[in-house]
């Protein structure tokens, strides 16, 4: 039997699959293999043109910006913004709420 996804199953059907480790790495690997939506893993990924986006945010009057940590690590210029780098969605929500 080849790879199967949620939409391939019928109600009441069951099957046996390989064992899955329930540590962070095992869960993320399982999700990447079977879940086509990358945001379900909760990891915040880099965005393109981060410096341009930050410039626009400053022009629009923003003072704080939550951004992917991987982008924050590669910035080549300073911005008149409080930058809040994050690696996980839960962390982004917490930082945006001021915690």
Image (tube, rainbow, N blue to C red):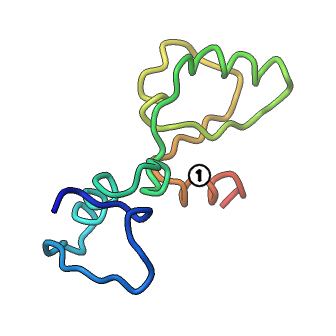
Q: Nearer the viewer, residue 44 or 34?
A: 34
Give 25 or 73, whichever is nearer the viewer.
25
Give 39 or 79, whichever is nearer the viewer.
Answer: 39
Determine whether, in the image, residue 91 is placed left or right of residue 11: right
Does residue 25 lie above or below 64 as drawn?
Answer: below
Residue at figure coordinates x 38%, y 63% from the top left: 8
Residue drawn at point x = 47 percent, y = 49 percent: 37
Q: How many marks?
A: 1
Q: Residue at x 72, y 58 (%)?
A: 97
Specify the quadrant that holds the C terminus: bottom right
Residue furthest out toward the right: 61
> In the image, is residue 51 above or below residue 4?
above
Q: Quadrant of residue 6?
A: bottom left
Within 10 Å of the Cα at label 1, are there few (<14), some (14-19), or many (20+) other Cα atoms? many
Residue 26: image location, x then y, percent? 22, 64
Residue 84 x/y as whole percent: 59, 41
Decide if residue 52 is on the left or right side of residue 68.
right
Q: Element under label 1?
A: helix
Residue 79 position in % (x across, y down) = 65, 20
Q: Position of residue 19 (x, y in %)?
A: 14, 75
Q: Which residue is mark 1?
A: 92
Locate the N terminus by quadrant: bottom left
Q: Considering only vertical position in the picture, is 89 above or below 56?
A: below
Task: Kindly indicate the quadrant of the structure image that contains residue 62.
Answer: top right
- At horizontal 41% and vertical 49% (from top left) the residue drawn is 36
């Amino acid at each position: 039997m080849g790879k199967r996804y949620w939409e391939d199953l019928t109600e009441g059907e069951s099957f046996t699959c390989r064992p899955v480790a329930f540590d962070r790495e095992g869960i993320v690997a399982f999700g990447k293999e079977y879940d086509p939506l990358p945001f379900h893993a909760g990891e915040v990924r880099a965005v393109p043109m981060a410096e341009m986006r930050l410039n626009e945010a400053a022009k629009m009057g923003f003072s704080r910006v939550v951004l992917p940590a991987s982008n924050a690590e590669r910035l080549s210029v300073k911005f008149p913004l409080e930058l809040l780098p994050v690696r996980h969605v839960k962390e982004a929500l917490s930082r945006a709420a001021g915690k």
